[in-house]
Amino acid sequence: MEKEKIQASEKNSELHVEILNLKIRNEALLNENATRNIWIKELEQNLTSDKEEELNQALKELDLDHKILLANKDIELANLKEQFDLEANEKEYFASEVKSYILESQRLANENTKLLAQGMDQENVLNNKINVLMQEKQNLDAIIKQFTKSNALVGNMVYNSKVSSNKEGLGYDANKPPKREAHIPIPTRNTLPKSPTK
């Protein structure tokens, strides 16, 4: 019986040792679990911190990209404005050139009209002078014709007076010396009276 007690006591001690070992293991597991939980929390915190840093970095990059995009847009708008101003200046310059060309064309047209009017006036004056000269020529032709006819008549009269011995009725005076033959010169352009010019 004592043997059984000893055996039971040994078993009880073994069980007690096992229980202690189990408690130790349990505490170790609890400590390990607590350590694991701490590690998980730290890992979560690190992950959260990394994510926040990544998010912040992404936001910074996005903000930088946005600023770069805005700067590029500003540059593009400035270039477009400069191009628009250049085109506006070119249009204004061309409009000024066209206006100057129109004014110069109008001035030249007015000068041409004035010169044409002067030319027509001169042509009219020359035509009038030509008409006057033609009229004078006709008058001179008529005068020459009359002089020629008169000269022929006088010549016939003189000839008849020489041929005829009867000089009665011709104003013959026996005491007077004979008269020289009358000579009427044919008028030339230099001897004609000048007509007033218009």
Image (tube, helix red, strand yellow):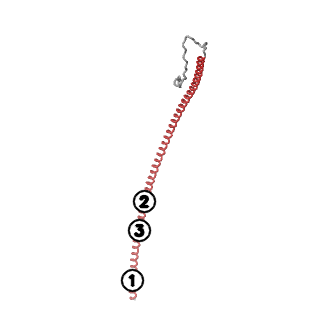
Give the x, y percent position of residue 121.
Answer: 54, 31
- Where, by quadrant of the figure, is residue 183 drawn? top right
- Which is more foreground, mark 1 or mark 2? 2
Query: What residue is rendered at 41% in x and 68% in y?
Result: 43
Secondary-structure class at tag 1:
helix
Query: What residue is rendered at 42% in x and 59% in y?
Result: 61
For marks 3 and 1 on the same chain, the one whose residue lies earlier in the sequence: 1
Looking at the rendered structure, which numbered label has been put on residue 14?
1
Query: What residue is rendered at 40% in x and 77% in y?
Result: 25
Secondary-structure class at tag 2:
helix
Give the x, y percent position of residue 92.
Answer: 48, 44
- Where, by quadrant of the figure, is residue 157 drawn? top right
Q: Quadrant of the N terminus?
A: bottom left
Nearer the observer, 135 or 188 = 188
- Which is more foreground, mark 2 or mark 3? 2
Q: How far apart are marks 2 and 3 (CA)?
A: 26 Å
Secondary-structure class at tag 3:
helix
Q: Mark 3 points at which residue?
A: 43
Give the x, y percent position of residue 151.
Answer: 58, 21
Q: Name the residue under label 2.
A: 61
